[in-house]
Structures are given as C-alpha cells and as structure tokens.
Image (spheres, rainbow, N blue to C red):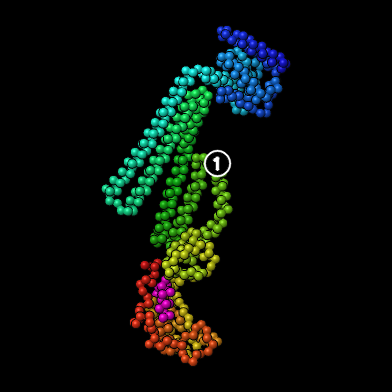
Amino acid sequence: MRQALAVFVLVLGWAGAGSAQAPPRQAPPVPSILGAVAPEPSGASFTLTYFNRHIVVLRARVMGRTPEERATSATRILDELVERGVTGPVRSRSFDGGALITVGDIGVLALTAPDIDALAGETIDTVTADTISHLGLALDERSEISAPRRILRSGLIALAGLTFGIGLLWLVHRARIAFDARLAALTEKAVEKAKLTGLDILKSTRVLDFERGLLTVVTAATELVVLYGTVAFVLRRFPFTRPWGESMNGFLLNTVETLALGVLDAIPGLFTVALIVVLARFLTRLIALWCRAVEAGRIKVRWLYPETVPPTRRLLTGLVWVFAAVVCYPYLPGSQSDAFKGISVLLGLMVTLGSSGFVNQIMGGFMLTYSRALRLGDFVRIGDIEGTVTHLGVLSTKVRTPWTEEITVPNAVIVSQTTVDYSRFAEAVLTPTTVTIGYDAPWRQVEALLLAAAERTPGIRKQPKPRVIQAGLEDFYVRYTLLVCLERLMAKPFTLDELHANIQDLFNEHGVQIMSPNYVFDPAAPKVVPKDRWFAAPAPAAPVARAPESRQDPAMS
C-alpha cells in the first residue's frame, strides 16, 4: 500500500510538471488510495520552515518517515521548484483523513490527522488554510530575491527609513538638551526672584534634580521606541529578514495591547483597593481623634493611661493598615500570578526566619509601655547606665546621660535587667555617699560634719532633711553614709562633686582624717590638710563656685 502511494505521488508530480505551462484547471480529488495509508503519531514534532518563515508543525510519521524527514523532503522539493521558476499557485487536494499541499500541481507535503493538535482547537481545514497562506508568502519572498529592481527599491526605502530614524534620535537628543537648559534657567530665575535662603535653594535644587531625572527617563524611553521602530522598519524591507521585522511589530503591538487590556481589567480591582484605603484612612483618623481626646482627659478610659496613649494609637493604626493590606491583596493587579505568589512566599519566609529577634524587641517594647515601667523624661538607671529617657520606641529606648551621651538600649535588654526609676518619687529619693572614719573620731562630730557639708552644698533639698546613718562597724573604721535628696537628678554627678569637696574641707578644717577605704593603724600624725594649704598652687587664691552653668541638665535646657 505504501509503495502504491509513493507511485501515485510520483505520477502526480510528473503530471504536474508536464502540464506546468497549461492553463489553470480544477485539480481532481486525490484518490482514496492515500486514505488507505494509516499515519501514526511520532511522539515528536518538527516545524517546517522555508525562507525564514514558519510554515506548519508536523507531528505524524508517514510511510516510515519522521516529521523531520518529511520537512527536509518538502524543503528540497520547494528548492527544486523555485529553481525551475515554479512558485505557484499553492493549492490543496483533499483525501480521506488529510490534505496534500501542491505548488503548481506538484505535491509538496501531505497533512494527516496526527499532524493536527486537537487540544489547541486545530482542524485539518484550518491548518491546511494556514499552511497554504504561509507557504505562498514564503515563495513570493523567495522569488523576490531574484528581482534586482525590487531589492534595490527595498534598499533605498530602508536607507530612507534609517536616515529618518537617526534624524528623530538627533531631534530627541537636542530637545532633551534644550529642556534641560530651560529648566535650569527657570530655577535660577525663580531663586533670584524669591531671594531664597541656602536651605530653600537646596530644596529647589532637589526638585530640579527630580525634574531632570524624569526628563532623562522620558527621553530614554522615546529613544528606545524610535530605535525599535527603525530596526523593525528596516528588517521588513528585505524578504529574508521580513519575518523578524513582523515579529518585532507583533511583539510591540501585543505588548501594548496586553498592557492596555491589563489596565482595563485592573480598574475594578484598583477601585476596590482605593475604596479600602479610603476607609482605612478614615478609621485611622477616628482612632487619632479618640486617642487625642483620651490624652487630653476629655474621655476617661480605665485601662488606658495618658503615657500609653501614643503607643496605643500607633498599634491600632498599624493593625488597621495590616488588615487593609490583607483585604486589598486579592484585588491587586497580578496578585494571582505565580510570580506574585512566589515573591509573597519568599518575603513571608524571610520574615519568618529573621523575625525572632525583631518580635522579641517589639514584645519588650509593649511590656515597657503597658507596664508603665519607663516614661519620657524619667531619670533612670538601666544596668550600669544612668540618664534621662528621651525616646521610647517599639524596638529600643534612648537614654541621655549627664555627660550628654545618647545611649540606645534594646527593649529586650531592658526587660531582662533591673531598672531603677528615680523620677517617680523624685522629691523623696535619697542619694547616698559613703565615708569611712576611724574609731578615734567621735561619731557625733562626724555626723555633724557630714550634715554641715550637705548644708553648704547647693542642689540639695532642705526637705526631706539630710541624715547620716552608721552603715557598718568594720574592723578598723566606722562606715558612715550621708543620705541627701537632690533637687535635680540629672545633675547628680555635679552635685555629689560639690558635696565631696565640702566634706573634705570640713574634715580637714576640724582635723578629722579620712582613711578610706581601709587602714590598719592610725599614723603618728593626723592625715589632714592644714587650712593654710587649701589653696596651694596652682589652685586659685579665692574659692571658686563648683557648679557652673555648663553642668545644667542638657535634657532640660
């Protein structure tokens, strides 16, 4: 049966070749002997391409030949026909279960049922029609190569189009320079007219930089479009490169069409997103109004204190926006695409793996805020750090020391340490200072001297009164602790400096020696500084105040 088919095709080809110059006539139907051949799927496909154009995809094995062998055979037949000057007409002859594609009554290719992709909606008729159209166009372009006049005409048109494209690129470049100079002139004129300060000039310069950047982006996009169109135009002028130019045009048009349709399809979703954002914004403003009323005392809430209102407002606002983002997600353009889902999963994984410490700091901030352990402006000691709280954040707390240092402490560290707040009962907080005196000094005299030093020192409150306690009876001395209440806790180091100076002066003046921290026996002569040596060089001859204005609380100034 296969041999009979081959003989019939050869006879058909000879008949067509013999009658190539005969007038066109209606081709008789192919006998049913072709239908007797049972083609089978090959499991592989091959695209028949002629003169750089895709003709048809072959998927069947016919008479033992694979799709690639069938395509090679068809290409060889087409080359022979073109060499003989036969480029048409391209027709089809139907047979039982397929169609034979002919060029000038010469059989070139047989299309069978297994060549058709039924899942893609193809049929024998549609595939045959497309094959005839593609093959006819490829043969016309192939014959165009043999026409020097047409090639010369196409070359001149391509040269004119290339010249026009280069001219457009030059005009775009010149327009960009002109606009840039115009922007600079307008900015300079506006600055001179408004008599702006240095900061205003800097801001206007940033605006100018933004405008220049926007102009650069627009110019680059325009140049790319012009270049793309010029290349596509030139490629379409020549037969062999014409498919590439058409594909470039098709890509550009399809991209524009896809983007336009995508924008139109996204309008309802974007409208929903905008509505959700407006509602969320309205809700956050209501929350802000309510929180300001609570903070001002116009609304009483038992579980909310004034110092916890700002963080509560931030927390509620953040929850509203998180909920709004979750609701908006399905309506965002591209949210259902695999790429969008992949990025979402990646971000979620990154947050999950790296958020343990982050969440720990946030929970520490909540504990500090709602336990009211710290407040802004409080003078505290956190571990070895003493200073005024200047910022209570979600992740960390900032403390300014008396030395004008700003220290950032993670909230988790604060929660895990002991924190002392001196400002809650500032008018009653007692600050200790300790001195050790031998047993040969009367304890009543020592207490009187310590109280006198406190009386002389500025910055110590009169109430509660300073007091002295004997903190310990050691082996060789008595440990005395003077308790005083400071007027300004932030000035603690400077007030204690003045107090220690007064203690030394009074003890030296009354001949009481200080042998801190330890001594074993009393020396032969008391270890005191005589009053006539208090101002030995290079000390000034007259007393100088020891609390200069530079020691004022930086946080309170």
> Does residue 491 show up magenta in the picture?
yes
Name the spot of residue 235 as percent of width and height, x first.
Answer: 49, 27
State which region is magenta: 487-501
Q: Amino acid at mark 1?
A: Ala
Q: Tell me if residue 126 can be seen.
A: no
Which SS does the magenta portion mostly show? helix
Name the spot of residue 131 as percent of width and height, x first.
Answer: 58, 21
| Quadrant location, the C terminus | bottom left
In this view of the protein, which residue sits in the foreground, 326 or 131?
131
Name the spot of residue 332 as percent of width and height, x first.
Answer: 49, 42
Name the spot of residue 322 as percent of width and height, x first.
Answer: 50, 50
Q: Which of the 4 quarters of the picture holds residue 9?
A: top right
Q: Is 114 left or right of 409, judged from the image as shown? A: right
Q: Is residue 276 above or below residue 486?
A: above
**Residue position for label 1:** 339
Q: Residue at x 46, y 53 (%)?
A: 317
In this view of the protein, which residue sits in the foreground, 340 or 436?
436
Q: Which of the 4 quarters of the picture holds residue 483?
A: bottom left
Q: Residues within 10 Å of mark 1 (few under 14, many from 20)?
A: few
Q: How many marks?
A: 1
Q: Is residue 86 above or below residue 211?
A: above
Q: Tell me if residue 154 can be seen.
A: yes
Q: Residue at x 44, y 72 (%)?
A: 425
